[in-house]
Image (cartoon, rainbow, N blue to C red):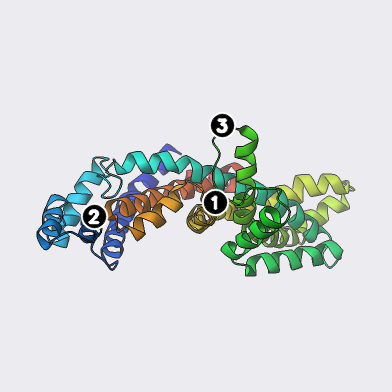
Amino acid sequence: MTAYLLRRLMQWIPVLLVSSIIVFAVVRAMPGDPAELIAGPDATGQDVQRIRVEYGLDRSLPVQYGAWLGHMARGDFGVSYIYHRDNSELIFSRLPYSLLLAATALLGALAVGVPLGLAAGLYQGGAVDWLASVFSSVAVATPNFWFGMLAILLFAVTLGWLPPGGFVSLDESVAGFARALVLPTLTLGLHGAAVLVRSTRGAVIDTLGEGYIRTARAKGLGRAHIIYWHVLRNSLLPVVTMTGILLGRMLGGAVVIESVFAWPGIGRLLVQSIINRDYGMVQGILIVLVLFFLMLNLAVDVLYGAVDPRIRLARGSS
């Protein structure tokens, strides 16, 4: 396992290098001049040029990329053009809120999607299967931001049960914090629940067709025993795969949801930084997201071995 982890970590180097080139190129291709935004509408050409020189924006793109990459290799994310604070300080102060939102949305999706998908697979063609199919089809086809606006209209404006957005710290009010978290969690977790329903249902149906299930039935094992020890456990591998993918999608999808609900995560910070052409902040956030996806993929691969012993044996022999 140690050798496997070291190999995977070494593979991160070229991935991060290529990702940094793509991130730098995409960010610098954004229209607009950050020096003009920083200087303001009343600034003279000399003021704008002075700001370009101060922030190194007058240098060629290869030189800017090399300087940025060198700072990033030392863990220096630079200073924000707009906030005049360290980018790393801002990013890592917002990251926990995005992770909290993605984690609660994933837990909600698992709580709904896996049991519903299991029931749909066990009772294929029945009422539960039909309900699960309708739910997953509607949820997958519904854009998150549109569903979020509908949720605000229903639960905040019409019923008045929940706040339409914003954030309340735990120190200020635990109940207020929980109520502010409900709508963005519900909105972000809807699509994930639908995907988990489909993947769990498919995995259960495939497992029910395996020979060892027929053997277990022939031995006279009880239905509950077969479902738990054979069907559910052998259906977990694709669910684990999809869970890891969904967590990454939810963190990426939080960019839109955080803006809709004014949630103070890195998604909202990314949108604000793009609007303000804050190059260093945008690049730093995107690189942090790339690192998160790499760590997530590694964690999912490790979980494979915990779920399926055959994968551990295959790794041990490689």
* Cβ–Cβ under 8 Å for marks 3 and 1: no
Q: Amino acid at mark 1?
A: Leu
**SS class of the residue under badge 2?**
helix
Q: Earlier in the sequence, mark 2 or mark 3?
A: 2
* Cβ–Cβ under 8 Å for marks 2 and 3: no
Q: Is residue 249 visible?
A: yes
Disc number placed over residue 96 in the picture, else none: none
Per the model, the C-alpha gap separating discs 1 and 2 is 36 Å
* Relative image position of residue 291 (x, y in whole percent): 39, 48
Tell me which residue sits at (17%, 59%) in the image. 43
Tell me which residue sits at (78%, 60%) in the image. 121
* Relative image position of residue 132 (x, y in whole percent): 76, 63
Disc number placed over residue 38 in the picture, else none: 2
Q: Amino acid at mark 2?
A: Ile
Pick the front one: 187 or 292: 187
- Identify the residue position indicated by label 3 in the image: 172
Depicted 120 relative to depicted 97: above or below: below
Q: Earlier in the sequence, mark 1 or mark 2?
A: 2
Per the model, the C-alpha gap separating discs 3 and 1 is 29 Å
Tell me which residue sits at (80%, 49%) in the image. 227
Mark 3 or 1: in front is: 3
**SS class of the residue under badge 3?**
loop
- Label 1: how many Cα within 10 Å (few below 14, some 14–19, many 20+): many
Depicted 33 relative to depicted 7: above or below: below
Left or right for 113, reference 54: right
Per the model, the C-alpha gap separating discs 2 and 3 is 34 Å
- Label 2: how many Cα within 10 Å (few below 14, some 14–19, many 20+): some
- Identify the residue position indicated by label 1 in the image: 247
